[in-house]
Amino acid sequence: MTTRIDTRFAELKKAGRSAFVTYVMAGDPDLTTSLNIVKALPKAGADVIELGIPFTDPMADGPSIQAAGLRALKNGMTLKKTLELVRDFRKDDNVTPLVLMGYYNPIYIYGVDKFLVDAKTAGVDGLIIVDLPPEEDEELCIPALKAGLNFIRLATPTTDDKRLPAVLANTSGFVYYVSIAGITGAAAADANAVGDAVARIKRHTKLPICVGFGIRTPEAARAIAEKANGSVVGTALVDALKNSLDAEGRATAKTVNAVAELTAALAEGVKGAQQAAE
């Protein structure tokens, strides 16, 4: 089965360029604004969208994304409403790949079987569940693959050649390489180190490799795009959203545009990598 993710990366490979992958938190700062932001991302240049599932204990996330999740939860965001957001997005866009990223607890509480049916029906293409290692593949990974969803795994600077085969065993769609050891938004990605890591992982898999954590500027996005199959930006977009809010943390007339404008600038950076490679 070919997913939207598979199709998009095949198109990008044919075009000779890397993907620009954006991350935003579902329901931040409220459901309506969040939907408008997600709708704006493809128009601004996003090739793939990662949509965060709000959770109370996001252990891999830095302060910015933690705060985004808390804003969403405060305004009543749930996993069920996240899937409603995806359904509403799909009314106007049936081609942009959409990945849910988060933690297992909300899915476990929702019920794995029900979640997979509802996610597939809503229009979700893949899952990144950061706290489920390969040893727990029977919990969600294998059922997700059987349901026709990509299951995207994280590889990190500490994932050595001995560990990589286990990490990659049931991974599909793409591999998400975490460029730094630590939480999101904590440090800048080193393009040269990333290039070495991507080359090493490519010896183990034919899947596209996208790099995230530590990419905040168009220049950084371009540098990473020249080394990998995709650049992932999350914290910078979440910060742009936060900086547009009013004193009470509510959306303003600037909020959607703030995220869209930074997305467009970052997308130009990624596209510039294609020109550099030609």
Image (cartoon, rainbow, N blue to C red):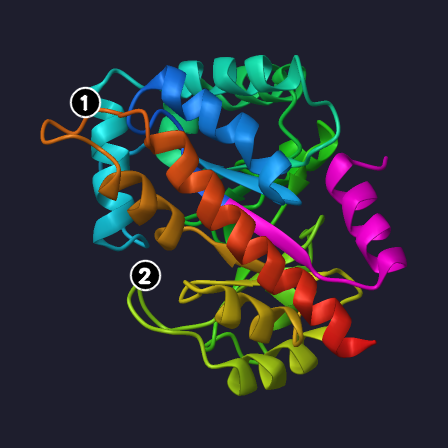
The residue at the point 66 percent across, 45 percent down is: 47
| Residue 71 image point, x, y percent | 22, 30
| Residue corresponding to mark 2 | 185
Determine the residue located farthest toward the right in the rendered image: 14
Q: Is residue 161 visible?
A: no
Mark 2 or 1, nearer chain start: 1
Left or right of 97 on screen, residue 21: left
Query: Is 88 in front, or is 170?
Result: 88
Q: Which quadrant of the view contains residue 199?
A: bottom right
Magenta-drawn segment = 1-22
Quarter containing the C terminus? bottom right
Q: Is residue 159 left or right of residue 52?
A: right
Work out whether 1 lies above or below 218. above
| Front-most of residues 34 and 256 | 256
Mark 1 is on which residue type? Lys
The percent coordinates of residue 23 (x first, y second) are: 47, 44
| Residue at 59% in and 54% down | 267
Q: Residues within 10 Å of mark 1 (few under 14, many from 20)?
A: few
C-alpha gap between disc 2 and disc 1: 22 Å
Q: Which residue does the image show at 54% across and 31% down from the upper left?
A: 40
Q: Label 2 is placed on what type of residue?
A: Gly
Question: Mark 1 highlights which residue?
Answer: 74
Q: Is residue 65 left or right of residue 176?
A: left
User: Tag count in the figure?
Assistant: 2
